Image (cartoon, rainbow, N blue to C red):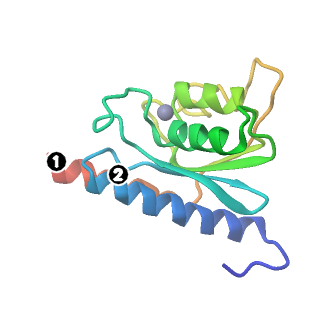
Amino acid sequence: MNSSPSDPQTDDDAYMHEALALAARAASEGEVPVGAVLVQHRRVIAQGWNQPIGGHDPSAHAEMIALRDAAQKLGNYRLLGTTLYVTLEPCVMCAGAIIHARLSRLVFGASDPKAGAVNSVYDVISKPRLNHIVEWRGGVLEQECGAILRDFFRARR
Ligand SMILES: [Zn+2]
């Protein structure tokens, strides 16, 4: 990654590519392909991919796994100054966790018209009732992030 002087847009694309690689890993394990990386000071400090089926855990979404991993590493449930990159718009559970963890920023790829909780079905992140505001951006590598999901479901039909 070459981005000096820093170009936030280029950085967003680069980190989303890392999240996409994790989504592919989820697909290879038979899980819905969603991947996430958590970045602090321009360094990936945690990663996650969907594993509710394999983990027998309904909360094992890519975002939750990345947040748990980061909180353990930092020894703090508050992940201040971090940005979460996730290939799919977070659900209500993950949006809630993102707020609890006090993330600074959220970047997602494809929108989720069935369960998205940033600005699609619910507006947990975009219109927070809580006092913590998370800056957010959607639609980063939207085509790739949506295609990996469509391909996965098409193959299973
Ligand atoms: Zn979720």
Residue identified by numbered label 2: 26
> Where residue 138 appears, x then y in whole percent?
62, 49
Task: For ligand 1, tell me if the residue under mark 1 lies within 8 Å.
Answer: no
Residue at (79, 59) in percent of width and height: 41
Query: Closer to the N terminus: mark 1 or mark 2?
Result: 2
- Examine the rendered structure and indicate whether residue 83 appears above or below residue 100: below
Look at the numbered discs 1 and 2 and tell me whether their residues touch, using CB distance below 8 Å. Answer: no
Q: Position of residue 60 (x, y in %)?
A: 43, 34
Q: Nearer the viewer, residue 12 or 68?
A: 68
Q: Residue at x 45, y 37 (%)?
A: 61
For this orientation, the residue located farthest to the left is: 157
**Marks 1 and 2, how far apart in space?**
14 Å
Vertical order, 19 against 108 (above or below) = below
For numbered disc 2, what is the local secondary structure?
helix
Q: Nearer the viewer, residue 106 or 122?
A: 106
Amino acid, disc 1:
Arg
Front residue of 101 and 126: 101
Mark 2: amino acid: Ala
Q: Report the disc number at residue 14.
A: none
Q: Give the x, y percent position of residue 153.
A: 24, 47
**Residue in the image at 70% along x and 26% along y:** 100
* Residue at (66% x, 62% y) in the render: 12
Q: Assess disc 1: are there few (<14), some (14-19) or many (≥20) residues with their C-alpha within 10 Å of its C-alpha.
A: few
Mark 2 neighbour density, 10 Å: few (under 14) some (14–19) many (20 or more): many
For label 1, the residue is 156
- Quadrant in the picture for the C terminus: top left
SS state under label 1: helix
